[in-house]
Image (tube, grey):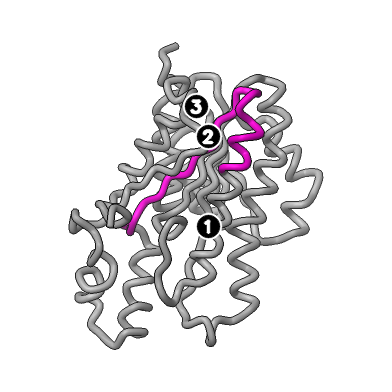
C-alpha cells in the first residue's frame, strides 16, 4: 500500500450522484476505497455506485428526522473518509430572498455537514485515522451579490472545517476545504440562466461578464480537477495538511 493508496478505507461522499460528487466518488474508488454514494436521487446514486462497485445511500440531508436519527449515526460511524459535497444554490436579492429557502440552505450545507462530522469522528478517533474534506467554494472566501444564503453557508462550512481540524489533529484526523470557482456542472448551468434573467443579459454573456470576470484563467473548472485534489487530501501523503482552504478558482481570489 503506497502513501496515496486508499485500499481498505471506507469513504462517504454526499451529493455523490452527479457533478463534483460523482467525480470524487470515482476518484476515491480508483484509489482503492469502498465508496458510499449518498444522494437524494436514488437513480443517480445507484448508477454511480454500480459503476464504481460502491454502495448507494438515499438520504435527504435537509430532513432533520433523518439526519438526527440513530440510524443515520450508525450509517456514518464506520467512515474513514468523509466528503461533504451536497449543496444547492438560490439566486435572489437579500430583500427578496425567501426566509425558508435561506434556512433550507443552511440546514443542508452547514447543519448536515456538522452532523456527519459529529457521527464520523468517534470511529475515526478510535481507528487513529480520518480524512474530512469539505467542498466549499471561492464563495467561502469571497462574496457575490444575490447569493447571500450560499455565501453564508460556505463561510460557515469553512469555520466548521477549521474547528474540526483543531479538535481532530491529535487523533490522526485532518479536515480541509477545497474552494473551486465555477465548475462545469448542472448547478452552474442553472446559475447561468438565473443570472442572465437577474441581470437582463444573454446567457452567452454570463460566463464572460459575471462568472469569469475576476479569473486569470478564463474557463470553468472541470469536476475531475476538483476530484484529483480531494483524492490527494484523503491519503497518507497529506497527513500534515489540515485546517487549510485550497482555492481552485483560476486566480479569482488572488485579487
Q: Which mark is residue 155?
A: 1
Q: Which residue is mark 3?
A: 33
Mark 1 vs mark 2: in front: 1
Secondary structure beneath label 1: helix
Q: Nearer the viewer, residue 193 or 173?
A: 173
- Answer whether residue 44 is visible to the viewer in this image: yes
Farthest residue, direction front:
255
- Answer whether residue 11 is visible to the viewer in this image: no
Q: x and y percent of residue 248 in the render?
A: 32, 47
Q: Which quarter of the rendered picture does the C terminus lie within?
A: bottom left
In the displayed structure, does residue 250 sit left or right of residue 127? left
Which residue is painted at 27% across and 72% down in the image?
210
Instruction: Decide which of tag 1 and tag 2 comes sooner along the chain.
Output: 2
In the rendered structure, which segment of residues is drawn in magenta? 162-184
- Does residue 71 sit above or below 108 in this rendering? above
Q: Nearer the viewer, residue 194 or 148?
A: 148
Q: x and y percent of residue 148 in the render?
A: 50, 72
Farthest residue, direction right:
70
Q: x and y percent of residue 62 in the render?
A: 65, 61
The quarter of the picture where residue 97 lies is bottom right
Query: For the residues marked 1 and 3, what is the alpha-carbon distance in whole angstroms?
Result: 29 Å
- Does residue 200 sit above or below 157 in this rendering? below
* Mark 2 vs 3: CB contact within 8 A: yes
Which residue is painted at 66% across and 34% down in the image?
167
Q: Which mark is residue 35?
A: 2
In the displayed structure, does residue 185 sit left or right of residue 214? right
Amino acid at each position: 500500500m503506497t502513501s496515496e493508496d486508499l485500499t481498505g478505507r471506507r469513504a462517504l461522499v454526499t451529493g455523490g450522484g452527479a457533478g463534483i460528487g460523482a467525480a470524487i466518488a470515482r476518484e476515491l474508488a480508483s484509489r482503492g476505497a469502498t465508496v458510499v454514494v449518498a444522494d437524494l436521487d436514488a437513480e443517480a446514486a445507484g448508477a454511480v455506485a454500480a459503476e464504481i462497485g460502491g454502495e448507494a445511500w438515499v438520504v435527504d440531508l435537509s430532513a432533520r428526522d433523518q439526519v438526527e436519527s440513530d440510524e443515520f449515526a450508525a450509517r456514518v460511524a464506520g467512515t474513514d473518509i468523509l466528503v461533504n459535497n451536497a449543496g444547492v444554490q438560490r439566486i435572489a436579492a437579500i430583500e427578496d430572498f425567501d426566509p425558508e429557502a435561506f434556512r433550507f440552505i443552511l440546514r443542508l450545507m452547514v447543519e448536515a455537514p456538522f452532523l456527519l462530522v459529529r457521527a464520523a469522528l468517534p470511529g475515526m478517533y478510535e481507528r487513529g485515522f480520518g480524512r474530512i474534506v469539505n467542498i466549499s467554494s471561492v464563495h467561502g472566501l469571497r462574496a457575490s451579490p444575490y447569493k447571500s444564503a450560499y455565501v453564508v453557508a460556505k463561510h460557515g462550512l469553512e469555520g466548521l472545517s477549521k474547528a474540526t481540524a483543531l479538535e481532530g489533529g491529535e487523533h490522526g484526523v485532518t479536515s480541509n476545504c477545497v474552494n473551486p470557482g465555477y465548475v462545469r456542472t448542472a448547478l452552474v448551468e442553472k446559475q447561468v440562466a438565473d443570472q442572465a434573467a437577474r441581470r437582463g443579459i444573454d446567457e452567452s454573456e454570463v460566463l464572460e461578464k459575471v462568472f469569469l470576470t475576476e479569473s486569470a484563467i478564463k474557463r470553468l473548472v472541470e469536476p475531475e480537477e476538483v476530484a484529483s485534489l480531494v483524492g490527494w487530501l484523503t491519503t497518507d501523503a497529506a497527513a500534515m495538511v489540515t485546517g487549510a482552504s485550497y482555492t481552485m478558482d483560476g486566480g479569482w481570489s488572488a485579487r
